[in-house]
Amino acid sequence: MTPLPVHLARLALLWERAAPVLAWPLAMLAVYATLSLAGLIERMGDPWRAVLAVGLLALGAAFATPAVRAWRWPSRNEAQRRVEADSGLKGRPFEALEDEPATGESVLWLAHRGRMREALRQVKARRPRAAWASLDTHGARISAVIVLATAFVYAGDMATVRLSDAFSPLPLAGGGERAVAEFWVEPPDYTGRPVVFLRERREARVPQGSVLAARITGLARQPRVSGGEAVIEEIGAGVHQLRMTLNADSAVIVRSGAFTERLDLEVIEDTPPRLALVSEPESDGQGLLMLEFTATDDYGVERYRLQIARDPGDGANPPDDSWDAIDIPPGAVVPARGENRYRATVETARHVLAGERVLVRMEGIDGAGQSGLTGPIGLRLPQRLFLDAMARAVAYERRLFLEGSGEYAPHPGPLARHVEDGFWPWLDDEPELRLERAPHGVQRLARALDALGDAPSAHFPDRIVFLGLRTAMHQVRRAREIGDLDHMEEDLWQIALRAELGTLADAEAALRAAERALSDALARGADEMELAALFEQFEEATRNYIAALMREAMQSDQLASGGGQGMNLNADMLQELLDALREATELGDTEGARRALAQLTELLRNMQIMAGGGGQGQTESALGRALREALEELGEVIGEQRGLTDETYEQSRSGDLAEGREGEEGRALAERQDGLRGRLAELLENMPDGMSEEGERAFDEAARQMDEASRALQRGDGQGALDAQDEALSALREGAAETAERLQAENEANGRGQGDRDPLGRDTDGGGVGGDTEVPSEMERQRARDILEELRRRAGDGSLTPEERAYIERLLDRF
């Protein structure tokens, strides 16, 4: 067996003889790698890269030829002699152990072999001799390593790319003359910013989430990209396209052979939306919550949600997972007076917490999915007030069902036996075992619906309510799992509405659906054809709703008792609002159309007919009459205060009211404000006794803010006057709400409804148009048409410069 030192010595001899052969090829390889790291190879491209590689290879082979000719493979004897020399042994012990004596083994020969064997136990092979030292007497190899390391550091993150390109068997683009690149940046759609083309520049500031796109022609192979993750695809022969999403500042480098492009892109951070409630939320008897808030974002808020949580009552904020969210349709959020101020109307009547003390907060979500929240505010979540006993009962059972029922218990029987026979297993699900397995809440709902359906016939003037109750009861009994009852919440709500409103419920649902569709289309900027179709649907739904109102009123004899005149007045006003909405839609005045739709919706929402016959054969009490008259006068005061506030805003904006400026405008507005203050004082003097503390506090605050607004107007402080007038309006509405609750309580106590009032809830003797509703005048609409026609005429003027024509086209696109 050959000892290990002999193998090591043989390897050492192999290296010492191979070093002269490899010296020059390795030197040429180091030169080629250094040139590639320096960027020369990628600038040369093919075929010069191949020429240089072949030349250096040939030069190295020429210098290595003498060493190749002198090459000999180290033998075993040479390795043994190397070990003996490295170990300082004499007598050639390896040969002694392998030789045989000619005359047989004597004692002396055996003793000699024993000494040689003992000597070989201490042998060792030293490391190879410095083979290159004799060739490189000046230490050029050290210099080569230093130069190569310096080139690697100089190349930076492109070192591996350049080495890969230099040694790649695939062809490279030659010289960079044929490769052409086009770069552009596509901002996210929600930013509304145009595409940025990087024609003569290679730097830009772009929104976060933008996409860097490029189309490169003339490359023989796919480019490499550093500075981010890019998706590269070949879309044609020699044509490559890349796309890269930018979320942080990036120095993007695109390389392929001699082709090199560097782009320095600064990313503008997209911050989350910022929201804040600016006034106390308002509500009505139909379960609608109105909130006014400010919302700011880099590129605008796209979606809004109302978050609701049960108020813990200890001042602590509920945990994040206890907040429920209601999506707000885009059309339900309209601009309010003031910068970045909006008003949202949210239907909360169907929420499980309706009528309870809750915390609410507005959530705004931008196009990037980031959200911002307002601070929580406590209130009693608005609920729909059902006056009909059957409607109240159904709504109550729906509420209990929504609060949670749990899951069904598993079926006790063997249901799998029919599967083998080809039958469905649920065929053996006995009906009596379905309700038995149901949770307590579902069993209670089944019993309640059964009891409601067994009510006397006097409770079912509308047979559809009876059929709805019986159908719902059978569906609850037949359900096999809680998922089968997902539709029950909607069904029970519709039954309650039908019991409360009769046929009016269907007309109201169709009107709300048409209203939401039109509002959402206006909010997203739909085209004229879609808006026209949606407007026709809304107008038809409005006509059907008015017809249903009149039918309900005639059934309860309200029209016969004097309500017809009020209905005619409301119909005229509705038609005027519809005309204004149609013209604003045709003119492309999106904001004007949204305002007109909001006003029309508010008017329709207030048109309530109490169809239960409460006005027949009953008289109004003196207290109820006084409260009603006070409430009507309050409505007029609120309308005039709102008009005065709008006029103050317009004059303040135009500069007629400025800080420290006194003039006729401020004194005239102050006198009108004082007049309203006096009218409010007279109204409060005639108000019946028994007002709640909240109502007294609200009216006192309204009077105080009116006085403050008057003083601000006298000294020319427009902003101070506006702030005080806003507070006065809020306090007046709160006081009016308290007065309305007193009136409703009085009417209920006397068994009296609203039979002698028109659909707006006003006395039919003095019905008229409220001051809160603003309809664009004919002059304003004609002015809008004139402006649109002038823009169209100028757009066709051939003498316009491209900049002027582009400006007019942008105006036409907007209006």
Image (spheres, rainbow, N blue to C red):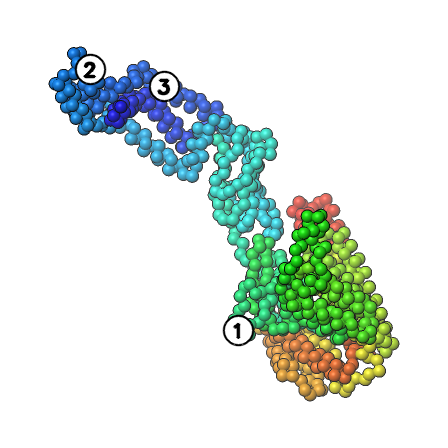
Gap in Å between the C-alphas at discs 3 and 1? 88 Å
Relative to 39, say whether 460 is above or below. below
Kind of residue sitting beneath label 2: Glu
Relative to 90, say whether 728 is above or below. below
Give the residue displayed 72% in from the left and 81% down from the top: 745
Q: Tell me if label 1 and label 2 are in contact, CB under 8 Å.
A: no
In this rendering, which labeled residue sits more in front, label 1 or label 2?
A: 2
Q: Residue furthest right?
A: 560
Q: Quadrant of the N terminus?
A: top left
Give the numbered dot on residue 315: 1
Gap in Å between the C-alphas at discs 1 and 2? 107 Å
- The image shows residue 636 at horizontal and vertical percentages of 73, 77
Q: Earlier in the sequence, mark 1 or mark 2?
A: 2
Q: Quadrant of the C terminus?
A: bottom right
Q: Is residue 385 visible?
A: yes
Kind of residue sitting beneath label 1: Gly
Query: 673 left or right of 619?
Result: left
Q: Quadrant of residue 632?
A: bottom right
Give the numbered dot on residue 100: 2
Give the residue displayed 32% in from the left and 14% down from the top: 69
Kind of residue sitting beneath label 3: Ala
Q: Earlier in the sequence, mark 3 or mark 2?
A: 3
Query: 52 left or right of 134?
Result: right
- The image shows residue 315 at horizontal and vertical percentages of 53, 73
Give the numbered dot on residue 243: none
In this rendering, which labeled residue sits more in front, label 3 or label 1?
A: 1
Task: Please name the residue that numbered disc 3 is placed on.
Answer: 61
Gap in Å between the C-alphas at discs 3 and 2? 47 Å
SS label for mark 3 = helix
